[in-house]
Amino acid sequence: MKRLALIILFAGVSASVFCKETPVVADTVSKEIRLNQLGFYPDAPKIAIITASGYSDFSVTSSDKKEAVFSGKLKASVEPALNGKKTSIADFTSFTKPGRYIITVKGLGNSFAFVIGKSVYHQLADASIKAYYYQRASTGLPEKYAGKWHRAAGHPDNKVLIHPSAATEKRPAGTIISAPGGWYDAGDYNKYIVNSGITMGTLLSLCEDFPEYIKKQNLNIPESGNKIPDVLDEIIYNLRWMLAMQDPNDGGVYNKLTNANFDAMVMPDAANTPRYVVQKGTAATLDFAAVTAKASRILNKYKKELPGLADSCLKASVKAWGWAQANPNMAYDQNKMNAQYTPKITTGGYGDRNFADEFIWAAAELYITTSNQTYYEAVNMFPDERMPMPSWANVRLMGYYAILDNQTELSGKAKSDLPMLKTRMVKLADDLIKGVEDRPYQTVMGKSNRDFGWGSNSLAANQGMVLIKTYLLTKDTKYLDYAHSNLDYLLGRNATGYSYVTGIGYKTPMHPHHRQSVADGVVDPVPGLLVGGPNPGMQDGVKVPSLVPDEAYIDDARAYAANEIAINWNAPLVYLINGLEAIRFNLSKTLKSNSQSKTVSR
């Protein structure tokens, strides 16, 4: 592979080589050496994996190959990889000197160059959020902000039709409403409330957990400099669309705003088929209620800059909750809908039939925002001992996150439930990290075949989010170290050797299932997007090169089951990398403050 490592400088408009030094040429790089293709914090774990057998020694060498700065012995993994072969582990955690390096295994070759440094993940942290700007609907992306990925506006969504499935007496079929803005959901150009729900909840959780950190970011978006954190500005762009998806007459929320069929692989401004809002549903309405309640308390800190928005969100949330209580079992069943109404809708369904988790999340957020105990007591908050990993279809843990993140605001039953919830959260994290040292890639991700389904990379990111949340709960840094392991996994320490984030690293997806990246005529895909990852299911009919679960990935724009992007997959990546950066930011502030205090005392 001849492509050099490119890191996108999101404060500007162009792509630049990550380091002025010449990287190791591709012809000397061994594909058998797998590691985080960006690098490492000086005090973080540093591990590379060798997938070839028969080697015993490794060294860390300056990237110009002139000086070996560290040497060590390779250690065989205790467990074999999913392909049945053992790996060798190169652990150089004790080497902490900042700089640019390569791993060398004599007789095998070199790794890609990587950096050890305090700011090694800064561009990735910004890129993961800036990716949402590129997903904006109903607006053009000027070159000033979008660089070479600039494009014209598409899908104005100011003349959206009420689909017959969504018709009411006050809004009969064919009624025109306006619901512009929001983010394109994934590789397609439709907008879905259910998937926006978990996405927004995850991003808002970052804002709630690290309010000082997010203030320092400049993502170079149109709103930059308006006294509101850029990540919150980006969230608000989608929030305003979500608010327009609520029927003001009864509080119910439409499942999605969509074409009847998926658009072709064209740019947004070339897609002009009619757009519809379709049937309301309990899942969509409760996800909406949770997001708007959470947004209300965060936006409440920006009343001067955003007059009335926090209040509008809370009113919308309360109204949505009321509709859901009156309609607790309204599933979105697209096949059943299509048997009854035309036009038939064939875009993503995000169908769900169990709403206990959505009730838990919405109740938790409304309780915390309003301090009204009736929300908390209206549902069975702990129906069993399960702590299911977040997904669009199961948002229970999002409710538990909200409770844990707002411990000082709890009273009554919620306060008495807190010790039990803390215990369960720590147990979840401990179950995730159990046995990592024996695994072939030394990552939390990859415990079994079950980790590798549709959107497997989002599981890795969500596991990392759980571990950061547990660190915030316990202050035990081992959870940060294990969260780092999954970031390493996503950036190249895995069975395929890919860094799964577009534009980040050396070996990255060049052909994601993403209409803009396919149709824009730009060689590099839109940057900062996490692709779905290994999935042997091949639901798209595209053959992957290996059916070994963690190797079942192909960089092919047709392969939506392995190589699509999605807003809900990027969100835990945003939390994982920005959470790690924020913790370092907060620690550096503490160290600086302590240093200043000592100086004053002297």
Image (cartoon, helix red, strand yellow):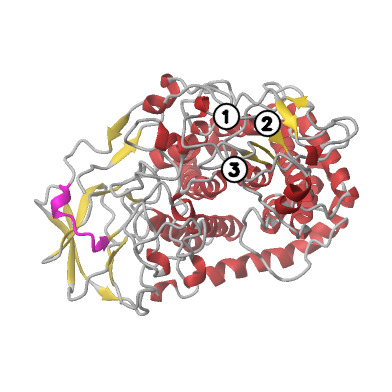
The residues colored magenta run 24-33
Q: Is residue 221 visible?
A: yes
- Up the image or down, 409 lies above or below 525; here it is below
The image quarter containing residue 248 is: top right
Callout 2 secondary element: helix
Residue in front for this viewpoint, 560 or 54: 560
Q: Dot 1 corresponds to which residue?
A: 137
Task: Give the amino acid type for the residue marked by disc 1 in the picture.
Answer: Ala
Task: Tell me the kind of residue under disc 2.
Answer: Trp
Residue 203 badge: 3
Upstream in sequence: badge 1 or badge 2? 1
Q: Evaluate if marks 2 and 3 touch, with contact meaning CB atoms under 8 Å apart.
A: no
Residue with the mark numbered 2:
241
Q: Is residue 361 magenta?
A: no
- Residue at 45 percent across and 45 percent down: it is 513
* Crowd rating for badge 1 (residues with CA inside 10 Å; few <14, some 14–19, many 20+): many
Looking at the picture, how far across and down is residue 529, in whole percent? 45, 43
Frontmost residue, 487 versus 499: 499
**Residues under labels 1 and 2: Cα distance?**
10 Å
Say which of marks 2 and 3 sits in front. Answer: 2
Q: Please state which of residues 247 and 440 is positioned toward the viewer in this rendering.
A: 247
Find the distance from the CA under tag 2 to the CA under tag 3. Answer: 16 Å
Observer-nearest residue: 323 or 122? 323
At 11% from the left and 51% from the top, the residue drawn is 65
Question: Outermost residue toward the left?
Answer: 66
Crowd tier of the residue under label 3, counting other residues whose Cα lies within 10 Å: few below 14, some 14–19, many 20 or above: many
Do the residues bearing badges 1 and 2 touch, measured as CB atoms within 8 Å? yes
